[in-house]
Amino acid sequence: MNLKYYLNKVNEENAIDEYIREEELYEDIEDDSLRNFLALSHHELNRLLIYLNSRLSNGYYTAAESRELIHWIKLIEDSNDIFTKTGMDIRINPNYLAVLRDCKKFLQHSSGSAIPSDFNKVEIIEYEPIYSHVDTTEVKHKDNITKYPLKLIGEGSYAKVFKYKDDFYNKCFVVKKANKDLNEKEKDRFKREFEIMKALKSPYVIEVYQYNDSENEYTMECADETLHHFISTNNNKIKHSERVSLVNQILRGFEYIHSKGYLHRDISFTNILIQRYDDINIIKISDFGLVKTRESTLTSVGTEFKGSLNDGVLQVIGFDKYDFVHETYALTRLIFFIMTGKMNLEGMKEGRMRKFVEKGTHPDTSQRYQSIQELKASYRKVF
């Protein structure tokens, strides 16, 4: 069964000469024929069910509308079968599904339909989709291809991030999908992110596995939580020794990244992840979409300011001027968060911590830590 052909045929045969506002509810559906079908069927069901509600008082549903509703119930049943056969996970709202089943019991093709006395008024869904679309990914194990449903766990201006459970390995993986509206330069940056992460071999860098050129997506390991979530939910019970361990891992990870000639440029509380093991929590550095090398030509003047911990001066001088002193600035703030659980730098007491932070975030970049090694040496003196 050719799903696209079927949907185009249904859309053409049932087209109406008016604007279908429900299309706005399905803007996230990338396929035009599928989006049009979902919006059209939602629109027509609502029209017919609203009219059905208006006929409850006299208990009679007129002949023309009875035939139309029978027609749409049949179309939706056929579509559900085809969706299942083609591996498309489209689900209609269960309340609407129950209403359609009840309607099917009393609707007549001719002379109208008597509405049962116990039939309740239908609650019309106008401002949210009646269909849910579950993204899937295909995974090949030997000679078998299995489709797994994807759960959206994050999204940004360039990509969406999904999670799925692989039954063969009995573990979770992550799929990062480039947004469909990216230009060629942005697509190059997205693939370059994968290639750089694939080349980096460190226990402190999230591992990536495979790139799918046709879908502009790649698969990577699934960490358990973000650093932000871990610190925020456990701050009162995290031992000092564990905080030091986490910072040391981050420093080793970024020392390795810098040794390969890269600057991350997008350090944040949520781009550093935690992988939990029975006896230790391991740092995983992720999101290399803005990574820069000394030779890079992908950073243009006027590139959008990124990274929640980045030096605000970059908004003035330009993100293309990002250098090691800006990376150590962000790392200083990250270390402060890990050691204290505080995201803001205000209100620090006098002492070694304050001196450490003041140097790392000094307005004069020549006074900051000039390398990860200098930052690490200073941190170890303080802690």
Image: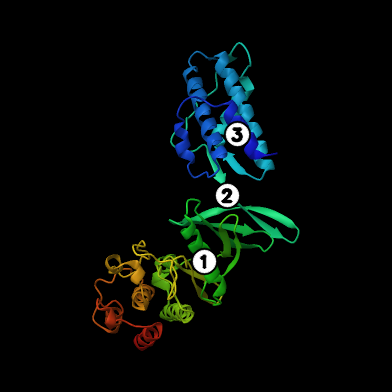
Which numbered disc covers residue 336? Answer: none
Q: Name the residue under label 1.
A: 192
- From the image, state whether disc 2 or disc 1 is nearer to you: 1
Residue beneath the point at 52% across and 43% down: 29
Along the viewing direction, whichever of 300 and 89 lies nearer the viewer: 300
Q: Mark 3 points at which residue?
A: 8
Q: What residue type is labelled 1?
A: Arg
User: If the image is split into quadrants, where does the C terminus sit?
Assistant: bottom left
Horizontal arrangement in the rendering, residue 253 relative to residue 333 (left or right): right
SS at circle 3:
helix
Mark nearer the N terminus (3 vs 1): 3
User: If the image is split into quadrants, where does the N terminus sit?
Assistant: top right
Position in image of residue 73 (x %, y %): 61, 27
Whether 182 is drawn above or below 350: the answer is above
Q: Which amino acid does label 3 sit on?
A: Asn
Which numbered disc covers residue 135? Answer: 2
Along the viewing direction, whichever of 62 and 297 lies nearer the viewer: 297
Whether 26 is drawn above or below 221: the answer is above
Position in image of residue 129 (x %, y %): 49, 38
- From the image, state whether disc 2 or disc 3 is nearer to you: 3
Mark nearer the N terminus (2 vs 3): 3
Q: Which amino acid does label 2 sit on?
A: Asp
Residue beneath the point at 59% across and 15% down: 113
